[in-house]
Amino acid sequence: MTTSASVLHLWQGEFVDDAEAGRRIAALPELAAGVLARPLPTEVVLAACAAVSADLADPASALYGRLAAHLPAGEAAAALAELSSALAPQALERKLRRELGGLRPERLTRPDARETVYEAWAPVGLLVHIAPGNAAGVAPLSVVEGLLAGNLNVLKTSGGDTPLALDLLAALGAADPTGRVRERVVALRFPSSRGEWLTALCGQADGIAVWGGEDAVRAAGELAPPGCRVVEWGHRISFAYLTGPAAADPAVLDALAGDVCRLEQQACSSPQVVYLDTEDTEEVFAFAERFAERLAKVSDALPAPVPGPAEQAEITTAEQLARLEAHLGLTRVFSADDGSWRVLADARPALDASPLHRSVRVKPLPRGAITATLRPMRRYLQTAAVGGGRADVAEVSRAMFAAGVSRVTPVGSMLESYEGEPHDGVYALQRYSRRVAVRTPAGEFGTVACLDDLVAAPVLPPAPQAPLLGKEGVQRALAALDARYAHLHFRSGGSTGTPALSVFTCDDYDNQMRAAADGLLAAGFDPARDRAANLFYCGGMYGSFISFFSILERLNATQIPMAAGPDHTAVAEALVVHGVDTVFGMPSYLWQLFHAEAGRLRAYGGIRTVFYGGEHFTAEQRRVLTEEFGVRMIRSAAYGSTDLGPLGYQCAASEGSVHHVLTDLHTLEVLDPHEDRPVTPGEPGRLVFTSRARAGQRLERYEIGDLGREVGGPCACGSHVPRLELLGRYGDVVRVGTYFLNYRRLAQVAQERLGYHGEVQVLVDPGPDRERLTVRLDEGYASGAAAALEALAAGVPELASAEAEGLLDLAVETVPVAAFERTPTSGKLRTVIDRRRGAAPGSGPDSGPAKGA
């Protein structure tokens, strides 16, 4: 629906007339109380903005056509492109990180993991935006900032404004299936002379954002109730400052002329004055004449609109006054014959505003006098373009900041900005928010990373409508990935074949490591007391060691970053010397370490906690570690993969392979094993993840290769974050001799029937007339090949049947632990090695879904 002459206002997604809007304004306090009680996740806002941004970038979209109709024909394309860019996910995510410290600033988390103090950014509440009438894009973007801060936003635009802001905000609400964006937006079009409405809005506000001159700001302040935060976006004045060499450079002058001509100096960042680093009046006059020549050239190439009568009167007054003062030796005037531009040189350094429309003043200001001369105007200063050498820019910038300037740019880019740049010296999101804190008892809340998880399940956007993505598709997409999003490169361990490349931005990586750190808190790691040794594998672009180094660093934890090494004696000695009580590593490596240095580590008895990833400990291995070595807790450090990053975590109440999903990062779907449809909740299926917190390599509906099921009901830890139970890998099942055999079943039978607690490796080889399946066992734990062969045949009927039918040869071999084949990068055990023709080199399952991040 679009606006019409009788439909003037937008109220929570519905277009209404004057009478209806008037009735609803009276009930704003009740509306605010109800709406603000429901949290607005920032990612819900980001998803809606992303959809609208895509439409604004597409001239064929219906939204593009509606909004273009509200703009001058020659300006529509540029204006909509600017709005699209401002609403793009990368721009808003950078803004959130810069201004509020992360992508989920509304969540009550622990800024210092050593303390059970929780902080978050909360909305100010009911935020009224009083928009300017000369910048169509400002109003809706201010509302978007208010939404990112979680506020209920009421926008007041001029009665003479086009409906562009209302149509854009209506589209934003329609793009959010949760309805939470729509309910937080009210946009009203009425003149400021309608005092009863303005009084009613401001009188109920918790915050007022106002654009305009001193009169507009003063009026808003007078209407604001006690305690209301008035956010002033008033008029500002900007200027250029040139050293001697810069003033003599024609290229600098052309760039400066461009800043003057673009937007007719209507922007707060447009130059109204040019200061020269000199006290010499004649030098100022000579420069003004040179600059006039360059301004004439640039102005001719950029036709200027004709000023209105009031604006022309102001221009004429300023120019005639300068001509009169020329008789006193104070000024010189250089102007176009057709009146399209003018340079007003003035011997006095005091800052004066220009009448705009390509009217620029030139004044002397030696750098030693910058602060004293400009500080009286500090409330109005915004941008200074500094032309000079590196040392000049550094020195002059400091003087400008002392005077009150908030922004320094190169000459020629005064009107440009960068994503996340502060406006008028402040961050808008912080001004639209307030910082809140909760202090709790350490003992009771030690494993609670986020208080919000104790209240309700997270509100998540639905999974995208997109085809399923596999590993090959990810690798193909990397070839076209913009280098701006390729900061960190990791490779998988290669346990399922050729190692795959995964790429992250530094912000992506930081966001993932912080989420994984919260998961480790929930798992029972105590950064205030535990002394951790990182024994994951390192090198070869493998990510486990560096990831857990980063996780522990973000937890402010004590860590001994050793990495897995072949010298078990040196590693064990370091554990003892440094008083390590918590170890992180791959089960196979930790198992070797504990047995190679059994005497030393039993005598030490200080290892209390084992966090593992990449593989699983068997029940018998867990028994040995707890009963013989005094380990009290053995828990998954993270469920994740190299390409997706951390996916889940085990809380203190999790058992077996149950994990909470890291919903801050991913959306999970469980699909039927054979069809691309969701399973009934609780039924097993294929795990498909959509990564929502990636700036560049956004993996949508990625089929990771794991099997699992959703776990319903409340978790004993109190968290409402969804849970899943991991059920293995697709590759755990291998077809041999027409039968499907499950690797995990073979390992389980060895454990149950033989009391075996070593590693198990399966080899499949072709044969002249039948295939051969060999089960490889560790000779240190196996009682003998014959007994093992008998136990496997009895415990896995399919094996006995296939052998009896002459479809395969079954063998068991016992070997030293060094004979087990492992991936060279990660050190993981290659559980199934299929050497038949057509099998990929090194093919076989990953050795367990609980992989290191």
Image (cartoon, rainbow, N blue to C red):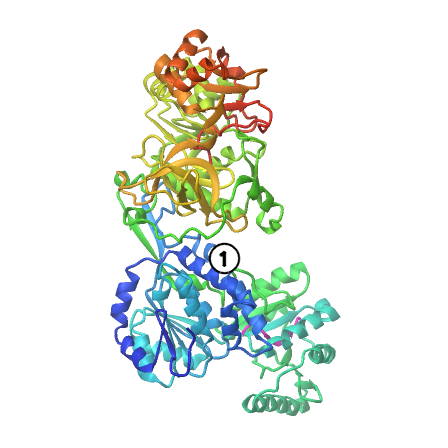
Residue indicated by mark 1: 89
Tell me, yes or no, whether the highlighted magenta stretch contains residue 645: no
Q: Position of residue 201 (x, y in %)?
A: 32, 76
Tell me, yes or no, whether the highlighted magenta stretch contains residue 273: yes
Q: Position of residue 367 (x, y in %)?
A: 62, 68
Q: Quadrant of residue 392?
A: bottom right
Residue 4 appears anywhere in the view = yes
Residue visible at 50% across and 12% down? 816
SS of the residue under disc 1: helix
In terms of depth relative to the viewer, which is nearer, 666 or 602? 666
Amino acid type, label 1: Pro
Tell me: 48 left or right of 64.
left
Q: Position of residue 157 (x, y in %)?
A: 42, 78
Find the magenta span and give its range. Answer: 268-277
When the figure is inspected, residue 87 is found, relative to residue 787, above or below; the finding is below
Q: Position of residue 306 (x, y in %)?
A: 61, 87
Q: Quadrant of residue 669?
A: top left
Residue visible at 32% across and 34% down? 654
Q: Main secondary structure of the magenta part?
A: strand
For the image shown, how many numbered marks are present on the structure? 1
When the figure is inspected, residue 5 is found, relative to residue 634, above or below; the finding is below
When the figure is inspected, residue 627 is found, relative to residue 451, above or below; the finding is above
Q: In the displayed image of the protein, which residue is found farthest to the front?
A: 805
Dot 1, how many residues are within 10 Å of its Cα: few (below 14), some (14-19), or many (20+)?
A: many
Residue 373 appears anywhere in the view = no
In terms of depth relative to the viewer, which is nearer, 739 or 310? 739
Check the picture and name the quadrant holding the N terminus: bottom left
